[in-house]
Amino acid sequence: MKRLCVLAAVLGIAAVASTGLVACGDSDSSSSGSGGGGAGEPSSVTIAQASQPDYLDPALSYTIHGWEPMWTVYTPLITYQREEGEAGSELMPGLAEALPEVSADGKTYELTLRKGLKYSDGTPVKASDFEHTIKRVLNLESGGASYYEVIKGADAYLSGGNPDADISGIETNDKTGEITIELTAPEGAFSYVLAMNFASLVPGDTPFENMTKDPPPGVGAYEFTKSVPNREFVLERNPNFDEGTIPGIPAAKIDTIKTVIQPSVPQETQDVINNELDFMEEVPAADFVAEILERFGPEGSEEQRYKEFTTLSTYYFFLNTKVPPFDDPKVREAVNLGVDKPGLARLFAGTLEPGCSFLPPGMPGYSESLDSGGCPWGDPNEAPDLERAKQLIKEAGAEGAKVTVWGDNVDPTPKVTQAFADQLNQMGLDAEPKILDGGVYFQTIGNESTEAQTGFLNWFGDFPHPSNFFFLMNGETIQPTNNQNMSNVDDPHINKEIDELGEEPDLPKVADRWEDLNEYLVEKAYIVPYGYRKLTTFMSERMNFEDCTPISPIIYNDYSQWCLKDE
Amino acid sequence: MVGPHPEEAEPAARAGLGPWRLTSRRLRRDKGALAAGAVFVLLVAACLAAPLWANHVAETTPEENHLSDQVTIDGKRTDVVDMLGKPIGPTWSGHFFLGADSNGRDIMVRLLYGGRNSLLIGLAAALGTILLGLLVGLVAGYYRGRSDSVIRWAMDVIWAFPVVLLGVALGVALALGGLSIGPVDIAGDSLAIPTLIIAVVYVPYMARPVRGQALALREREFVEAARAQGMGSLRIVFTEILPNVASTLVVFLPLLVANAILLEASLSFLGAGVQPPNASWGTMIAEGVDRIATAPHLTIVPGVMLVLSVLSLNVFGEGVRDALDPRARVRIEH
C-alpha cells in the first residue's frame, strides 16, 4: 500500500504532465512515404482517416469514410457529373450508355450497358452483374437495402432465403447488355438510387459476404491493392481504366494513394501542417483551426492549402410529438424561438453555418428565404428571443417540466447536448443531458420504449433529392424499433405531399412544392434545425491545391481528380 | 508494564500516556504533515464555499453555458467563446476568474463544484472501502475456515484486475443503465455509481491487512481470556479485535481517500465516472484535452487541484503512519 501511495502521488503529477504530451502525439505517427511525381516516376501520396471505414465493400458501406475512396474504384450504371456546385448534382451515364428510359407509369427503367468494359482485374463487365450487385445489397442486409426493396420481387427474394434466386423485377441480357428494372410503385428518386454507391457493379462471382479485407474489383480510376483493416488501405491506378473509358470520368493522375488510419486528429493535423501527410479526411483539430486559417486559408499568409465547403447536411434536434412536453405545439414553438443557433455554431469551431431550413443549401427544395430574414423563429444568425420563449412555456403550463436531452459521445455532440439542455433550462424547462456511446445511441432513441423526448440528430444527404431528407418526417416510416422519424411526425399534409412528390421523376417540375413543404415543416416546429455542416479540404504543399481539388456536392473530396504540383 | 522502545526518548511514556495522545503529540511535531493537512483542509473549505463564489462573485452556475455572451476585459468587450470555439482565459476578476471552458462555463465555479464531487466521492468511497474491508477482513481472519477461503478467493479475483481497468469496465456498464438491485435503484448518472465502484475495487487493499491482523490477534491471550469468559465470537470481534486494528484504519484512511480521488478522476477522464453535466476534476481535464494548445488552462487548473489534494493527503497520511509507530506505544495490560 505504501508503494501504491507514493505511486499515486506521482501519478497525480504525471496526469497533468501527460496531458501536455498528448498534443505532441505518439511516436507511431502517420507514414510519410509519399513521393514521386517527376517525369516517368510513379507518384504517390499518403492520406489519413481517424477511423477505419465501416466497410470497403460497395454493397455495405454507408459512411463518407467508405464512399470517398470507393467513388474512385466503383461506378454504378448511372453516376454524377464530376463537377463542382449544382452541376455536380446532375446525373450522367456511368456504366450505362445513357440515362434510363422511364416508362410513362414511372415503374419501368431500361438501360443498356456500355460495350467492352472491364473490371480492374480484366474480367469483362456483364449486364447480369447488375442483378448480382443488387442481390448482394439485399442479401447482406445492407443499410441501403431499403432503397432497393421497391424493385419488384425484392421482397420475395429476401423472404426466399436463397441468395442465388432471381429477382423477378430485374431482367438482363448479357448479349445485348440490356437491363430492365421493374418497380412495384413509381419512385421519382429511383434514378438517384441507381447512382448510389450500393449499386456499383461488381463481378457476378463476388461472394455474399463482407469483402472489406479483400475488396472486389470495380470499374473506376483506381483499384484496391491492399486492405489491412484498422491500419491502412491502398488505391492504385486501374490499368484497365483510361481517359475516355467512361466519358466524363477522368483517369487517375496520381499513381498510388495510401490511406493510413490515424486515430489522433491533432496528430493528423500537425502532420499535414508539417507536410508529413498529404491530406486528412477529418476536419482539422479545433486547436489548430485558427493557425491553419491564418497561414493556409483563402486569405492566409502562405499559399492556400485549406478551404471549407458546406455539405448537403442538416443538424437538428428532434422533438418527440408523442410525449410531453413536446406534444404541445406551444412548447415546440418556444424551443425554436429560444434556441441559440449562433452559440451552438461556436461548438463546431466554425464548421457549422447557422440555419433555419430542414432542407440544406444546394438541395432542391431548399428555401433561401428561411435563412435570410424569413425564418418564423428569428434570424438564425442573431440572438434568440428568450423572453418570448419563456412566455410561451409559461402559457403552455410547462414550466419546470422534466426533459432528458439525448446525445452520443462523438465530439462535439456531448458539448452540443449539454448546451441545448442549458438553453432549455433558461427557457423554463428542467432539462438534463444524457450522453450515450455512439454505438448504441440511435438504437436507443429509435426505440419507442425509451420515449426519448429530444436529442441530437443530423442527416447528410445520400443524394440530391428532397425525398432523401423527408423520409425522416414521413409518418409511414414510424416503427417501434430502429425508428428514424424520432419526432414521430405524422402530419397528413406532409405524408400526402411526400407520397405525391416522391413519385414525380421530373424533379425541377415539383421543386417549388418541395420548397413549400420545407417551409411548412419548419413552421410546424416538429424539429429544431440549427445549421448545416461544413467539411474541409486540407492538404500538404505537394498537392496542386489550386487546380486539382474540386468539391463534389455528392462525395465532397474526389481523390481521382487530385494531382501533384509538378504534374 | 511494557516501557517505550529504547531508541525513542519519550518522556511522556514514563507518565503512561495512552497511544492516541502519543500519536497526537508526534503528529503535532511533524510540521510537514500538518502543513499538508492544512492544505487539504483549505481545499475542502474552498470547495464547500462553492455556492458562495457562484452566487455572489461569479453570478453563474456550474452548468450555465455562456456561448454567445461577452465580458469586458480591460475596457474591451470580448466573446466568452469566439467564433472558432476558443474560450477566454483567466480574467482574474469575479466573472470567469480562471476563464471559461468550450461551452462558455465558468471554470472557477466548475472547479469548486467539481471539487465537491471529487472530494465527496473520494471520501465516501474510502469510507465504503474501510467498512467493507473491515467486515470481510475481520470475518476472514477471525472465523477462518470456509469463510476465509471464499473471501480470499473473492479478493484475489478483484485483486487480479488492474484497478483502472476494472473501474472502467464497471463504470461503463453501470453508467448506461444504472444499478437496480431489489428496492435499490440508482440512476446511471448518479454520483453513487462511481462511489460504489471505487469502494468495491479497493476492498482487497483494506481487507488483506485487516485479515492478517485479525489472524494474529485471535491467538492473543486477551482474546482467549474473552472466550474463556464466555464472550460470543461477534462480541469478541467488535470489542477485542476491532479496537486493535483501529490504528490501521487511521493510517489507511487518508491514503485511501487520495487513491479514491485519483481513481475517480481517471474514471471520469475516460467517461466511466461522473457523468455530464456534473463536473469533476477528471471530466474537466477530459473536456480540456482537445484545446490543450490554445487553452491549456482547461486541463492545467483541474490538474493542479488534483495534484494538490492527492499529494497533501499522501503527505499527511505518511505523517499519521509515522506518528502511529507501534514500537513506541505504551500498552497497559490487565
Image (tube, helix red, strand yellow):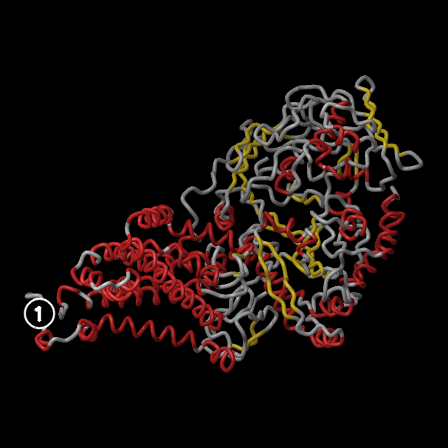
B297 displayed left or right of B314: right
Residue B179 in view, yes or no: no
Q: Amino acid at mark 1?
A: Met
Relative horizontal placement of residue B48, taking residue A549 as reference (left or right): left
Give the SS element for disc 1. loop
Return the residue nearer the eye: A140 or A30.
A140
Q: Which residue extends farthest left?
A: B6
Name the image quarter holding residue A388.
bottom right
Residue farthest right in this picture: A104
What residue appears at the point 35 percent right and 64 percent down from the top-left corner? B257
Crowding at mark 1 (Cα within 10 Å: few <14, some 14-19, many 20+): few
Indicate left or right for A554 with B280 as reference. Answer: right
Q: Nearer the viewer, residue A30 or B12?
A: B12
Viewport quadrant of the C terminus of chain A: top right
Residue A449: percent from left, percent from top = 68, 54
- Residue A318: x, y in percent? 71, 58
The location of residue A187, given as percent across then percent down, is: 85, 40
Residue at 50%, 52% (x, y): give it.
B172
**Residue most extreme to the top:** A175
Give the chain of mark 1.
B
Look at the picture and state if B176 lies above or below A90. below
Location of the N terminus of chain A (image quadrant): bottom left
Tell me the residue that label 1 is attached to.
Answer: B1
Q: Is residue A235 above or below residue B6?
A: above
Say how many tags the image has.
Answer: 1
Residue A283 % position (x, y): 58, 50
> Is residue A40 in view from this perspective?
yes
User: Which residue is at the front of the view, A255 or A61?
Assistant: A61
